[in-house]
Image (cartoon, rainbow, N blue to C red):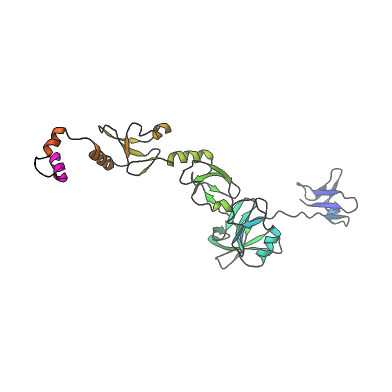
Amino acid sequence: MKKYKNKRTGDVVEQDGYNKYLYKHFDFNLSAAMVEDSCDWEEIIVDKAPEYTVLEYETIAGRATLRKNGTYFDSSYCRDDVTGATWEEAKKWIEEGENKIISIKRNSDRKIFTKNDRIDAYIFNNAQILGFKLEKHSPGKIWITTLYGNTPLHLVKLSEGLPLFYTEDNNIPVYEGDEYWYYHSDCSSGTIWHANADCVNKRLDDVKRFSTKKAAEEYIAKNKVLFVTEDGKGVKEGDGVFAVTSSFITMSYTNICGDYWKLTNKDSDGTKYFSSSKGAQEYIDNNKPMYSKQQIKDGFKKGRAINVNAFLEHLDK
């Protein structure tokens, strides 16, 4: 709604939200003609909020990323305790050349647009973003160029922005500023971290991201390696293994589940675990006592040198 200020008294009136021909004040109302056509009143121009925020741009040395304090600094530095270039300083650099902007955020819905993203705009489907260009004569606006003959497409005309990444649980899109939980892919520490998505943590390698802490905990419980079998395979919750008791009486197949104490004390009774029945059987064959004293005595013949292979063959008959 428009606002006008009286040059002499300083009174401010605002256009009525239901009747554009009426201006309202606490003590009185005026018609639009009495305000807009009078030399006694001047319109109050309110700067509109910019429709975009530049998140990352190219520099001579590499890239600069927007920090939480509103300044831009080297993208390779992942912490926020620095003071970099202000937006006015960054804008001067950006305006000197074409397509220096790498990534922007549309402020109306926090959608992210990045070079090489695929977008839908006007009649174009799956157009690729070549770059961005500031609109000098309309502060707060930006143009996008695409592969369709470098046709300039205004940002508000774009139908959709792309998320920074998707979560492991149900492939949920995460946009700039959204909270999420993550941990390092090997699950070695089991520590779950909380963060708000931005262009810096988008580039973190070897992490798994989730929409809730509970989803991260469930994923860790299911995918963390609990122990390694005798034949070198990592075992996770729910995996099946072949168990051989210390007495070699049985070889059984079981799914790993239950409390963690049992797993950490899995070999306290001498039980060995294998990923395959073949490995378990080989262990039994190589370690289970199979012959009596008499069989061993019969395996040796008096006055002849001992041939180990022949001896074993004799025992197996």
- 93 vs 5, left or right, is left
**As drawn, is 33 to the left or to the right of 144?**
right
Could you tell me what secondary structure mostly forms the magenta stretch? helix
The C terminus sits in image quarter: top left
Q: Residue at x 33, y 35 (%)?
A: 254
Question: Percent x, y for residue 86?
Answer: 69, 57
Res. 55 visible in picture: no
Q: Position of residue 114 (x, y in %)?
A: 57, 58
- Is residue 95 in view? yes
Viewer-nearest residue: 272 or 258? 272
What is the quadrant of residue 123 in the picture? bottom right
Q: Is residue 126 magenta?
A: no
Q: Identify the image quadrant of residue 295.
A: top left
Q: Position of residue 122 (x, y in %)?
A: 58, 60
Q: Position of residue 108 (x, y in %)?
A: 65, 51
Measured along the vertical axis of the image, is residue 186 above or below residue 44? above
Work out whether residue 291 or residue 29 is closer to the camera in this orientation and state it. Answer: 291
Q: Residue at 78% of width from left, 52% of height from top?
A: 2
Q: Is residue 310 magenta?
A: yes
Kindly give the residue lying farthest to the front in the view shown.
Answer: 303
Over which residues does the magenta segment extend?
Answer: 306-317
The residue nearer to you, when weighing 134 against 216, is 216
